[in-house]
Image (cartoon, helix red, strand yellow):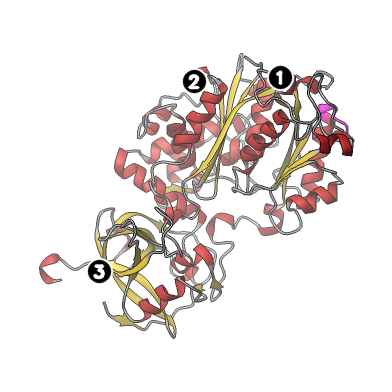
Amino acid sequence: MGRPLPGAPLHPWARSHGVGSGPVPIHSKDNPGRTPVIVGIGQSDYPKAPHLDGIGHHVQSAQRALADSGVAKADIDGYATVGMGNDDGAVNMAEYLGINHRYIDGTMTGGSSFEFHVQHASEAIRAGLCDTVLITYGSDFLSRMGRTLGTGGFARAGQHVGGAAQWEAPYGNTLVGAYAMAAKRHMHEYGTTPEHLAEIAVGVREYAGLNPDAMYRDPITVEDVINSRMVADPLHKLDCCVVSDGGGALILTTAERARDLRQPPVYVLGSAGGETHWNISQMPDFTSTAAARCGPEALARAGVTTDDVDTIQFYDSFTITVLLLLEGLGFCKKGEGGPFVAEGHLRRGGDLPLNTDGGGLSSCHSGMRGIFLLIEATKQLRHQAGEAQVPDCEIAVACGSGGWLSAIGTVVLGRSHP
Amino acid sequence: MTVELRSCDQPWTRPIPVAGEFWAAAAEGRLLIQHCPACGHRQFYPRAWCTACGAEPAWEEVSGRGTVHTFTVIRQQGAKPFRDEIPYVVAIVELEEGPRMMANITGCPVEDVSIGMAVRAYVVEAEPGVGVPFWEPAPPASTS
């Protein structure tokens, strides 16, 4: 359990209970030993794993993260997850995994939940609430529900609905349709073209070709994307992510503890999150997301600028998602995402390689993809990404989008600490 | 605005406080949004408080006229009853009074829908006392 740091006084409660590191200075520059780092990553079998249920994906990912890091299970005193249903929420999973936590987080912001979990866990570690946090995710979406997620898989005829869903349910919108309305508005205001969006899918597919586990690996062209079936105008089939099975796990701890572990630590340099709406009909500006605020905030906390970033792992539920995040974080001006993408920055060999694991567009998307962004960013910063390795990778940004471009979480990771 | 009765089995709301008044009024051919007496903010969907200042908002009947802010044409949909209706338009309509709401645009080919086009509301009575607004192209100004 927690070890008090030299000179850090224990809170009376912690002393009497014999646990906890006690209050420590919040700013890690005053206490560099408590700088939060990612020390373990694990991914369960994907893209199709009928031998695992959702919890099985949590477990296999966590086992692989423990093995990767060298962390002992008994040292985990913090836990975070987001459930797909009742049985895999944070409290149930903590019980299932047998984690006697001092810190727990069940924040649910959809696919970006894990960026929020890392933000919260980092500050909890820095503050001494806990020392070692496990974050897990697992989903058997493809094996359980097929490919229906984006096109009406949850709707049922004749049902009564309540809450905010009642203002949308009668109109038969789909998940794809929600993002399509953002893409349509962006095209209207800024002249973005279907070819611009297609370029994103083409570049990510090139990286999928380097990932033997990716769901789709054959190269595609812009024409292939444009000629693929229209699902919801203006988004074609190849503008949409895959539906897969898959899970992931991360282990975070202090820089001090990382010295005794297996992997080079990856530093959480800065993070921020935000939400502009939840339901798509409440989106205040269909061409802008919460990334416009939380992206620059996270970069500023990390003390870096967009020019310092070597690779981006961005939520690619749809091609338009990437475009809006790029503009939000300030890699290009608002409205200029289309021409920026067309210049090839995001491609293999470009100056800002995107989704080097093949992304959700071509490799793995089991419903809430945010944890895979952090896992791939960590691989890149460890220089363990194999053929997909970005040369001299020092700074990576993971940016998750949850809901319907609703809740955005940005995490800036580094190979070293400034 | 006139009320037409059309058969349908889309998912409807279960009338509840605040929201229930909207659906009941729609069944009578009145389209409601909220207007805050404290700060003047207008909002949709209806809530128990003003999202701008936190005060209790009041109801305001609106014209039922608006424009298409953005839209998509749904061409793949697995759920009943919608799968039998593809292709159809899902849109965000911006009301003349400001707030936006989700909508279907009916009464014209999907190819004719565009951002900025003028639309007007009509209501389908889903079940007794529950009206659901839908939208169709507005007639030219000279004849409206």
Q: Position of residue A172 (x, y in %)?
A: 47, 65
Tell me how far mark 1 sits from mark 2, CA to CA.
25 Å
B19 left or right, relative to A392: left
Extent of the magenta region = A68-73
Question: Can residue B94 be seen in the rendering of this structure?
Answer: yes
Tell me how far mark 1 sits from mark 3, CA to CA.
62 Å
Q: Are marks 3 and 2 on the same chain?
A: no
Question: Can residue A411 be seen in the rendering of this structure?
Answer: no
Which residue lies under the disc numbered 1? A31
| Mark 3, secondary structure of its residue | loop
Which residue lies under the disc numbered 3? B63
Chain hosting mark 2:
A
A103 left or right, relative to A190: right
Which label lies toward us, 1 or 3? 1
Tell me how far mark 3 sits from mark 2, CA to CA.
48 Å
Chain hosting mark 1:
A
Quarter of the view holding residue B27: bottom left
Comparing A2 with A68, the one in front is: A2
Which label lies toward us, 1 or 2? 1
Identify residue type, mark 3. Ser
Comparing B132 with A146, the one in front is: B132
Which residue lies under the disc numbered 2? A305
